Image (tube, rainbow, N blue to C red):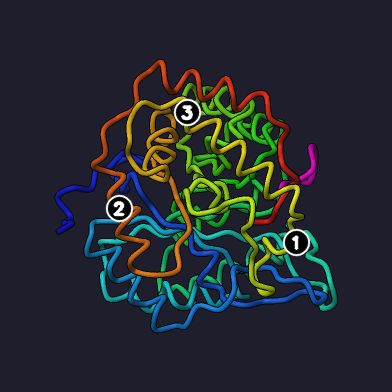
Amino acid sequence: MLSCAAMKYRKLRGDLRVSEIGLGTWALGGSLRLGGAPTGYGDVPSSEGRRALERALDLGINFFDTSDTYGLGRAERLLGEVASKRRGQVVLATKAGWVPDGQERWLKDLSEDHLRAAVERSRTRLDTDVIDVFLLHAVPEAGDETSRALDVLDELRTAGRIHLRGASVAYDVEAGQRLLATDRLDVLEVHYNLLHSGAAPELLDDARVRGVSVIASSPLAYGFLSGRYTRATTFAADDWRSRLTAEEIAARVERVAELRSVFTTDAPLARIALQFVLAHPAVVTAIPGFRRAEQVEELAEAASASRLSDIEVARARELGKNWARPAQTMS
């Protein structure tokens, strides 16, 4: 039986400590289409989402990442309903910067008016006075757009609307390096996983030197490091991964098999993948996605798993450098 005692914690900032295994809530947004194309992971009943979140809290998971785009606020509302019952036990991060154009695209909006309004809407949906971590979801262009967006984050923090400032850059290492160089971030969220480590370790090294905490998003590479998928896998029509071609799925599955051979342990692949991410000292929490309470239990077990050897981590990173970065995905 799993218990809170098995969970480990790391310092996010100051006295704020978060569970090594956090959770990303994109899937809780449910089915959402934009221009006919799916932008989520399919339907997740609200009751199932609440049960999964409650189980996570029971297991000592206290960090949750969300966004105003996930189900256009649905994920935030579900998270707020559950988290409001555990005041003082939960650390919440949310993001803003994308808006639907009403037809078929997400448009970047990092204007002061939008960011301020987004924070107020998120505070309401999350049922909290202060957002623990607020992240730019879209990457600002170098120059004035970056300066203006960071100015807004500073002002929101001074006004007591948010506690920590950050940015989410997905796989865009160059953008992450540029934003770190401003020395105006407390937190950086970056896609980091076994399948696509690429140049991310160097970015994480820089973050550590600058005292910026790293949230590792997509640590299971959109589920491909769960160990459940094969070349024959197909995804439901309301799952954004249904847009992947058979060749793209096969390439990922083959790459996962190659990476699995690096490790001597017979532990489940997802557990290995999460330990790989947590092996970097800049990472304070990894935020895999989930849909059900049973998945949350499996993910929580990674916190008590044996650490990987330095040799295994180095070999896996080297393999990760040799695979092309995937197309950007808003997540």
Of 72 and 317, which appears nearest the observer?
Answer: 317
Of 229 and 44, which appears nearest the observer?
Answer: 229
Decide: few, some or many residues near mark 3? Use Cα within 10 Å; few <14, some 14-19, many ≥20. few
**Point 77% across, 74% down: residue:** 34
Q: CA distance from mark 3 to mark 1?
A: 28 Å
162 lies left or right of 197: left
Question: Of the numbered discs in the image, which one, if any, rests on residue 300?
Answer: 2
Quadrant position of the N terminus in the picture:
bottom left
Q: CA distance from mark 1 to mark 2?
A: 30 Å
Decide: few, some or many residues near mark 2? Use Cα within 10 Å; few <14, some 14-19, many ≥20. many
Q: Residue 51: x and y, percent?
A: 33, 76
Q: How many marks?
A: 3
**Point 48% across, 43% down: residue:** 215
In magenta, the rendered stretch is 139-146
Q: Are marks 3 and 1 in contact (CB under 8 Å)?
A: no
In the rendered image, residue 222 lying in the magenta stretch gets the answer no
Which residue does the numbered mark 3 point to in the structure image? 261
